[in-house]
Amino acid sequence: MKACIFDLDGVIADTVEFHYLASKKTADVLDITFTRKMNEQWQGRSRKALMEAMLFQSSETKYTEAELGRMKNDIYRTYINYLTPEDTLPGAAELIYDLKNNGVPLALASSSSNAEFVIRKLGLYSSFDYIVPVEDVKNMKPDPEIFLRAAAFLNISPKDCAGIEDSVAGTKAVKQAGMTAVSVGKDNPGGDIHVSSLLELNYFILCEAVER
């Protein structure tokens, strides 16, 4: 393994519930239903696509997709503003430090425009060599573009990279990028290797998985 590329929400940061709450409040404005199950299905996909889907379901014509997106993001930012390193998911910081201590370049491939803000709040910003600017990504997960951009910046062949994801769409993106997919969580068993949390991973396990 020559590089490791992480998703953020649900892998490093415990922010999935914040995304749900912000999306639910936005859906309430449109008088439409938004459930936790729906939130799971939208994980890894763009805010723009979600807002377009919400507008399609609603008879409300007062808001544009961009206005709804700003509304949802403003609500989300009120939640993540209070993040601390204690909100890092179990095993995430330990794995990141283990990889860095072994000289592995790290990148963040998140669909969130708030990725840098969140990773700074968690105290992990300096550990990452690159954060893919999501505004530059034309095709969102499950398209592999964001992972391929990360590998290209690091100048590492995708086949030598591990990609860690908690969403089905994200795991598909890692696989389509030609990387070793590490799927995290009970609802996402589709990776080349699957773990319930990052506590089950370390540098040697990831190296073995990539070199199979």
Image (cartoon, grey):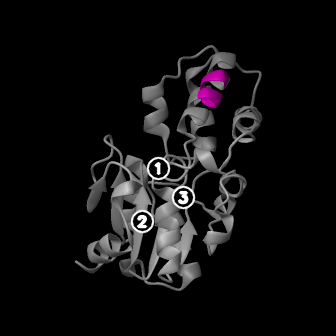
Q: Is residue 6 visible?
A: no
Helix, strand or loop at mark 2: strand
> How many discs appear?
3
Task: Name the residue tied to disc 2.
Answer: 163
Question: What is the quadrant of residue 161 in the picture?
Answer: bottom left
* Amino acid type assigned to the residue bearing label 1 in the image: Pro
In front here: 78 or 30? 78
Q: Is residue 31 visible?
A: yes
Distance from the alpha carbon under mark 2 to that under mark 1: 18 Å
* Amino acid type assigned to the residue bearing label 2 in the image: Gly
Residue 73 shows which numbered tag? none
Task: Name the residue tied to disc 3.
Answer: 139
Quadrant in which the N terminus appears: bottom left
Q: Residue at x 60, y 24 (%)?
A: 24
Nearer the N terminus, badge 3 or badge 2? 3
Q: Is residue 144 magenta?
A: no
Quadrant in which the C terminus appears: bottom left
Q: Residue at x 38, y 50 (%)?
A: 197
Distance from the alpha carbon under mark 1 to that under mark 3: 30 Å
In front here: 140 or 174? 174
Question: In this rendering, which labeled residue sits more in front, label 2 or label 1?
Answer: 1
In front here: 25 or 82? 82
Task: Name the residue tied to disc 1.
Answer: 90
Span of residues in magenta: 21-25
Distance from the alpha carbon under mark 3 to that under mark 2: 17 Å
Q: Is residue 24 magenta?
A: yes
